[in-house]
Image (cartoon, coloured by chain):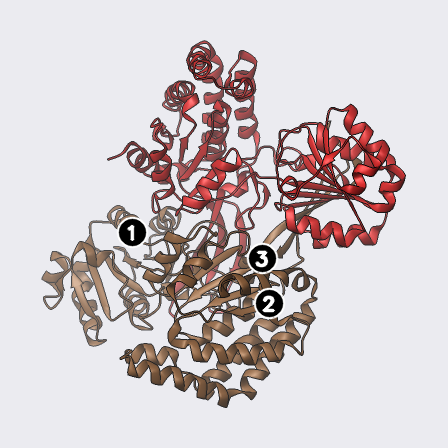
Chain colours: A red, B brown
Amino acid sequence: MSEVKDKTSLARATAGALNKLSTQQKNEALLVMAEALVQHRDELIAANDDDLQRGRTNGTSESLLDRLKLTEARIEGIAEGLRQIAALPDPVGDTLEVLDRPNGLHIEKIRVPLGVIGIIYEARPNVTVDAAGLCLKTGNPVVLRGGSAALSSNRKLAEILHEALDTTAIPRNALQIIEDADRASVDEMLKLNGLIDVIIPRGGRSLIQTVVQNATVPVIETGAGVCHTYLDASADPAMAEQIALNAKVQRPSVCNSMETLLVHEDFASAHLARLAERFREAGVELRGCDRTRELAPFALQVTKEDYATEYNDYILNVKVVGGLDEALEHIARFGTMHSECIITEDEANAARFLQEVDAAAVYHNASTRFTDGFEFGFGAEIGISTQKLHARGPMGLPALTSVKYIVRGGGQIRE
Amino acid sequence: MSEVKDKTSLARATAGALNKLSTQQKNEALLVMAEALVQHRDELIAANDDDLQRGRTNGTSESLLDRLKLTEARIEGIAEGLRQIAALPDPVGDTLEVLDRPNGLHIEKIRVPLGVIGIIYEARPNVTVDAAGLCLKTGNPVVLRGGSAALSSNRKLAEILHEALDTTAIPRNALQIIEDADRASVDEMLKLNGLIDVIIPRGGRSLIQTVVQNATVPVIETGAGVCHTYLDASADPAMAEQIALNAKVQRPSVCNSMETLLVHEDFASAHLARLAERFREAGVELRGCDRTRELAPFALQVTKEDYATEYNDYILNVKVVGGLDEALEHIARFGTMHSECIITEDEANAARFLQEVDAAAVYHNASTRFTDGFEFGFGAEIGISTQKLHARGPMGLPALTSVKYIVRGGGQIRE
């Protein structure tokens, strides 16, 4: 049997036991896991060093090495993440609906774990712990397949966490880490219908597309964000500037940052020159339409491809539009249904935008950067869903559950 | 452009308009559709006759021809289905959650249409109308690809319904029927990511597996039901007999009927001979384990393959088990997570069964035949989900919706 099938079967066999655990047992286990990480931080940093060295030899970029790197502070941060998950309410067992039928059947709809969750991700060891914590808290066995560049770190994490789990009520097999670095191990996971209930990819666009295109197991698509901010004619200029800058430069590398600024022509005439200057000062490369380039001659010419690109960088498209309709059309064409924003003092336009834009999160007069599990008050998130099935937007613990109908009768039969 | 892509694009273009309709506008359209079917029933029956004749020429079985056949009474039943959908509450626009954040952001989670829904099904013209009604009621454009054996009926239905829609607020393009009978048109639908938001297959196991194995668009898996009834040691004999017979013979052709009867050895010793006789009288072929065949010598030898088979017929597997644990193991191994039942007077065993069996619906002392949208009080269903993602069990109107976060601010930016 392959490593993937073998480990996934072992994980699946723990589902029943996990489902029987109390919230307290699960929380205690998460705290033990957090403590173990802190205690074994030196070993962990040593194992991580192996990955970093291998990465340097292979010519890995500094920014990727930085994502891979574990430090004492980062390990403490990862452990703190587990403690925060332990502190969150447990959705499993919640009664969502009670149906009393005329024939006397008593039906309860309750939350249950989702089942075996597969996570496919890149070389970020923090995802290993974070995903394990969220899945185990919700009673789901988890099979983690991280990038080969983090293999040594992930092996050590598995060793530490398994040893920790052995002192808790959670069976060690509920957490599995696939070590097979071959791409075939990903392909195998994607087709394990019956053993894996859902796969969540976490990473860049190409990883996510590989998963979506090849999986026969259900997938929750996450991440890609080509987000827009539309400055309407009546936008408050100070608010518009503040929000637009925040949406772009506060952290350009994340999916909820802005990639394209749409500007009503009246607002543009009065304020775009100044706003473009502010972006330039902040180190943002502007790519604009003709009208934008008249007002901000230093802007490059924008292309159709640019409008469809998630830069995750200090680059911004700027387009002057005739009004709300043109803004809505642009967003419908180029948006990825992630986060979209209108800045306006016109309530009717705000209402239209909020109703008509088809996205996980739609904003009036606030930065798209708030699309985030912590900012929404969910406490933690496994990702941001950009699909419409099962979960949409930031996915907190309830997104890792399913439901079950419990039907109690007294001998009812169907006539 | 292909028919599939062309029609799906046309359907998608209506999503915004559909989303703006009031519940009343949608309900009026459904009633107009119902009326049109009744008015044009003669044309419809004539078109259906073409399909029936073609089917007879091609040697289609009588039972398939019966599923395909439209009569005046059946057309009235289909129209009545639309009227019932019109009478159901509209979930779209419901506020599911309100989050007021410390920074002043006001976040509402509201129900929105799911998007373009693709339905792939077999030669049952009633599904055409039923699926159209459910999808349009929830504001979703729908692309229907029925079996080629019903093509003439479906064409006529499209003509009648499109003409009816032209007198309503629903754009005719929101309802599309794919006429291309080639299997390639199904394959194309399955990969229309970005144009289709979800595909729901309705039909037999092979149709569903084709969709699950080949789709890159998200799928809701429906249908397959290898359902069990477990008669515990303490089961009330009269209730056990009544429910077991009902679960098998009241309508064997449907997914929530029983395929395997599990019997505690003590109950078997006292009652299985009589129960087997009752099944024989009802025309059910029994396939039993060794112990069953001792008690009911007319039973055939059951095989492992039998335990995994959804007969949808007057055939039943019978297995004597040592107790609850063995019953749970058997269900975990051979069940399809659809509907499972325990008959017992022992509350502790009932509680264990209800908690530990991983299925959409778990029953204590009632027939599995109740797993059904109407019986659960949902009023109508688009199918019964046997997956854990998005929807599980009977899918009423809310299963055809997604959510959207609407965020209202006063200039908030992320620090």
Q: Nearer the viewer, mark 3 or mark 1?
A: 3
Q: Which residue is mark 1?
A: B331
Q: Which residue is mark 3?
A: B115
Q: Which residue is mark 2?
A: B174
Residue sitting nearer the eye, B356 or A284: A284
Instruction: Give the quarter of the image for residue A405.
Output: bottom left
- What residue is at 50 percent from the left and 84 percent from the top? B76
Q: Disc 2 residue type?
A: Ala
Residue sitting nearer the eye, A340 or A395: A340
Cβ atoms under marks 1 and 2 closer than 8 Å: no
Asked if residue B410 can be seen in this view, the reply is no
Q: Secondary structure at mark 3?
A: loop
Q: Earlier in the sequence, mark 1 or mark 2?
A: 2
Q: Disc 1 residue type?
A: Ile
Instruction: Give the quarter of the image for residue B414.
Output: top right
Read off the chain for label 3. B
Check chain identity for marks 3 and 1: say if they share one. yes
Read off the chain for label 1. B
Q: Report, in whole angstroms, how far the alpha carbon at label 1 lies from the one at label 2.
A: 42 Å
Quarter holding the N terminus of chain A is: top left
Q: Earlier in the sequence, mark 2 or mark 3?
A: 3
- What residue is at 50 percent from the left and 34 percent from the top? A202
Q: Report, in whole angstroms, how far the alpha carbon at label 3 lies from the one at label 1.
A: 36 Å
Query: What is the crowding at mark 3: few (fewer than 14 residues within 10 Å), some, or many (at least 20)?
Result: many
Q: Disc 3 residue type?
A: Gly
Q: Nearer the viewer, mark 2 or mark 3?
A: 2
Determine whether, in the image, residue B76 is placed left or right of residue A338. Answer: left
Check chain identity for marks 1 and 2: say if they share one. yes
Q: Residue A323 placed where, x, y %?
A: 80, 51
Q: Residue B401 placed where, x, y %?
A: 58, 57
Q: Secondary structure at mark 1?
A: helix
